[in-house]
Image (spheres, coloured by chain):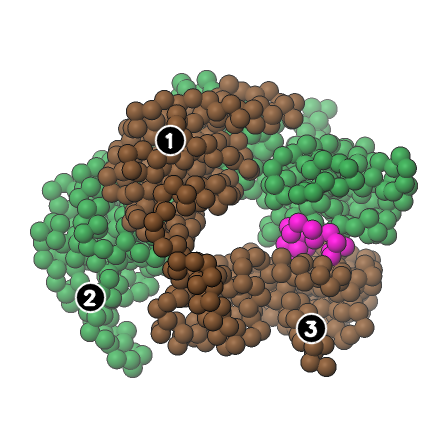
Chain colours: A brown, B green
Amino acid sequence: MKAEIIAVGTELLLGQIVNTNAQFLSQELATLGIDVYFQTVVGDNLIRLQESIQLASERADIIVFTGGIGPTQDDLTKEALAAFLGRELHIDRISMDLVEDFFNKRGAHMTENNRRQALVIEGSSPLTNSTGLAVGIALSHEGKHYIVLPGPPKEMAPMFVEQAKPWLLQHAITNEMPIYSTMLKFAGIGESALEERLIDLIQNQTDPTIAPYAKEGEVTIRISTKANTEQDAMIKLDVLEEQIRSILPNHVYANKDISIERAIVDLMTERKLTLSAAESCTGGLLMERITSIPGSSTVFLGGIVCYSNQLKEKLLNVPHDLLEGDGAPGAVSAEVAEVLAEQVRMIGDTDFGLSITGVAGPDYSERKPVGLVYIAIAERGKDTEVLELRLSGNRESIRMRTVKSLLYRLWLKMVQSEKLQQDS
Amino acid sequence: MKAEIIAVGTELLLGQIVNTNAQFLSQELATLGIDVYFQTVVGDNLIRLQESIQLASERADIIVFTGGIGPTQDDLTKEALAAFLGRELHIDRISMDLVEDFFNKRGAHMTENNRRQALVIEGSSPLTNSTGLAVGIALSHEGKHYIVLPGPPKEMAPMFVEQAKPWLLQHAITNEMPIYSTMLKFAGIGESALEERLIDLIQNQTDPTIAPYAKEGEVTIRISTKANTEQDAMIKLDVLEEQIRSILPNHVYANKDISIERAIVDLMTERKLTLSAAESCTGGLLMERITSIPGSSTVFLGGIVCYSNQLKEKLLNVPHDLLEGDGAPGAVSAEVAEVLAEQVRMIGDTDFGLSITGVAGPDYSERKPVGLVYIAIAERGKDTEVLELRLSGNRESIRMRTVKSLLYRLWLKMVQSEKLQQDS
């Protein structure tokens, strides 16, 4: 089965935003066994949009639109598709209620143009928008299948996964052998090192297939196979997963698509452990990542962003002699990282205390180079572990990679302590 | 003049990489006054590639290819274009020397397929690759202009800027006027409300043009005009900017592409003001955003993530009676927000203290609904401002919008205090 993705929006053609939706949808369609032959981007222009629809419906079986369904006059995707199919548009009552509710709750006036967000094409299935206002559409017409999704990624992605994907499985791709896949999530190893370790498996494997990819300091491998039943698939996938785990025992933190912060919160919840943190150069990023996980409040009690030396002394009792003066190791040092982790653990009375101090750049500080970072993990009743990192990249990537490194170390410590207990 | 960008590569259609090249090229072409009407992505397939070339040459004057010019058998862009134009391919001697040099210098054996990287179309101008091996191509044919660039962004971008752009200016776009534009950044107002306030301007304006767009709780307007000189353009753009500012005086925080956190750090640096923060439900996101700005350390001293009630009491002196017990307002209350902001301001001895306490979800807490958030701004020597927000959306969007609201309020407070001083 062939698909085409049409992203609609002049902001894409002006280069104001990058088309991450096409990537997301391509990945998702690939897992359904659907081949994407073209991705098209067209502006907010009725005629060119209709030309694109005409062309796509000639060369694809499934056409997925993203964008152009917001409240404004230049949002034209639904109009263009309805006109192409010769069908009417009407207001979907349930969607309209949701839009009105949204404004009522805020006590805000709903402008008339917002009614457009509740439009659907006659005879279609509305796709509810769980994170925004504009309703989506799924419909089949003369053997072709059309999916209309919003443009903002945070609306598009959940709508595709929760609604469009099940709809496609039910209406469009009933006679393909389904693809089953397992996602293996790695931490503490880079993409090329991973590929090198797995090169024999990658080169010799045809079924299941192995597809590694990397994003934002995380490496993921998707192993996939076609099978008639889930059970048949899982047997093949499990064997390969075990092979990979035996080659890289300390790096697979999950076999589903979760972040390492999610894995940590789950593990700590299960073991009734608690956590606090003191951050300097990452400025709150570590705590923000942990608290992004729903349910993290049973594990994470809080912490301190000690960006200035004053606060390091005042709130975390770092001795002045460590921070300033001749021969002092300075704020960016293993000594200070250790004190920060131990102090914040004691202040929060938690099982673990984490700390970060370093130079995120763009300028050096304390005559120390950009990318020099110390991380520490204090554990109740144990010695504190301190690590020196030397990272390259810009401010954002140094901060992100510092946090990922510390999370990996924390995860490893917990997993290894479990192994020790089991072994003893 | 109309352009189309064709990105070639099956890895794009599988979603393994995101098409940042299309964004880069669109931005570059826009600054040359060239309208991009379509972006296309096609796989490494000769027939579909030729179909795409056919179509693009019917609907555009300039066709820019990126990708598919490497050494392997599935790199087909040059072959497909040569066949479409009915021209021959031959090895460019200078490019071939560079490829051979590359392998000789490393003492590495050059495999035969690397000769493909030196292929050019007869009658074309070769575009030298300053950061890689594959040579690019520029040529005009029957009134259409074709540019062939490599796929890797670090090869594509310099080749476009250093060679393709000057070639286009000389051969293709000699009589176009360049486009100049200003970006206006808004806070504290949504996309549809903004559009409603500016509807007359938007509907009546043809030059300069007005293009609003929204992302992650921020609204941006780009105003653009074609002109012979930058001075001519700026006169027209300045008049329109003033009109927009007079309609929405409290919402334009910048006329360049910066975040509101950047605007705040700049303003506070200029006025030598300092800042601290206490965050509950946002878990560090506010401080992370502020410290993402290089140079924020002169303004921002630090703060506390008081996720648990214990830490609210212990570190921020919130009276126990406010947090727990019969008739207590609870952690999510205006009273607690006020104490948090004032206490953290005093602990840090800063000019401003910010605080956030609320229910980010997915579950309610203290019998309070998801999306109920209190934010507060304490200022040295002034009354503390407390605001109640009622937000909808998921955990991530509630947290993000809370932070954006608080940043907007802080910016507004500073701008208005400046106005008061000027008026008095």
Residue in the picture at 85% in, 42% down: B323
Is label 2 in a helix, a strand or a loop? Answer: helix
Both labels 2 and 1 in a single chain: no
Residue with the mark numbered 1: A77
Residue in the picture at 66% in, 59% down: A266
Badge 2 sits on which subunit? B
Magenta part of the protein: which range?
Answer: A280-301
Q: Residues within 10 Å of mark 2 (few under 14, many from 20)?
A: many
From where the camera sits, is residue B234 visible? no
Q: Nearer the viewer, mark 2 or mark 1?
A: 1
Q: Is residue B247 above or below residue B47?
A: above
From where the camera sits, is residue B88 visible? yes
What mark, if any, has residue A418 been given in the picture?
3
Question: Which quadrant of the figure has residue A209?
Answer: bottom left
Q: Quadrant of the C terminus of chain A?
A: bottom right
Kindly identify the amino acid type of the residue bearing the numbered disc 1.
Answer: Thr
Residue in the picture at 38% in, 34% down: A139
Report, in whole angstroms, how far the alpha carbon at label 2 lies from the one at label 1. 42 Å
Both labels 1 and 3 in a single chain: yes
Kindly identify the amino acid type of the residue bearing the numbered disc 3.
Answer: Glu
Residue with the mark numbered 2: B116
Place of residue A282 in the rendered image (x, y in percent of width and height, measured from the top left): 64, 57
Horizontal side, residue A48 vs residue A102: left or right: left
Q: Is residue B230 magenta?
A: no
Q: Earlier in the sequence, mark 1 or mark 3?
A: 1
Q: Residues within 10 Å of mark 1 (few under 14, many from 20)?
A: many
Q: Give whichever of A183, A71 is nearer the camera.
A: A183
